[in-house]
Image: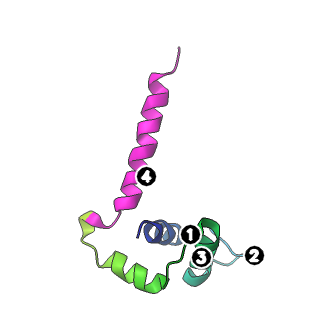
Amino acid sequence: MGMTEILSALLLLGGIEDPNGNPPTTKAMAEAFEQLFDFHFNSIYDCQGELYRRKPCNLTKTLDAMKGALMKEYKRKENGKKY
């Protein structure tokens, strides 16, 4: 489900284009993710449906965890700086 969150958020943000300069389809993006990360969604549309049926507080669990990891690393590096 985490990859579905990431894929869906990237599609919604925009800025990703196919070779013709058009936004990729959900299916094309899912196929690229499957190849890149060596896994299978089975049905990206079913996965997205499951994602959007979550309670709002659970909608972005993976994205929240990713943000937390980035913030933790940022703070670790900030504390290690020498001025």
Local crowd size for mark 2, using a 10 Å CA cut-off: few (<14), some (14–19), many (≥20): few
Residue 7 in the image: state x and y as whole percent: 51, 70
How far, Cα to Cα, is label 2 from label 4?
A: 29 Å
* Image disc number at residue 29: 3
Dots 4 and 3: beta carbons under 8 Å?
A: no
Which mark is nearer the camera, 1 or 2?
2
Quarter of the view holding residue 31: bottom right
Dots 1 and 2: beta carbons under 8 Å?
A: no
Q: Amino acid at mark 1?
A: Gly
How far, Cα to Cα, is label 4 from label 1?
A: 19 Å
How far, Cα to Cα, is label 4 from label 3?
A: 20 Å
Q: Which residue is mark 1?
A: 14
* N-term-proximal mark, 4 vs 1: 1
Q: Which residue is mark 4?
A: 66
Point 43% across, 52% down: residue: 66
Q: Which residue range is magenta in the image? A: 58-83
Q: Which residue is mark 2?
A: 19
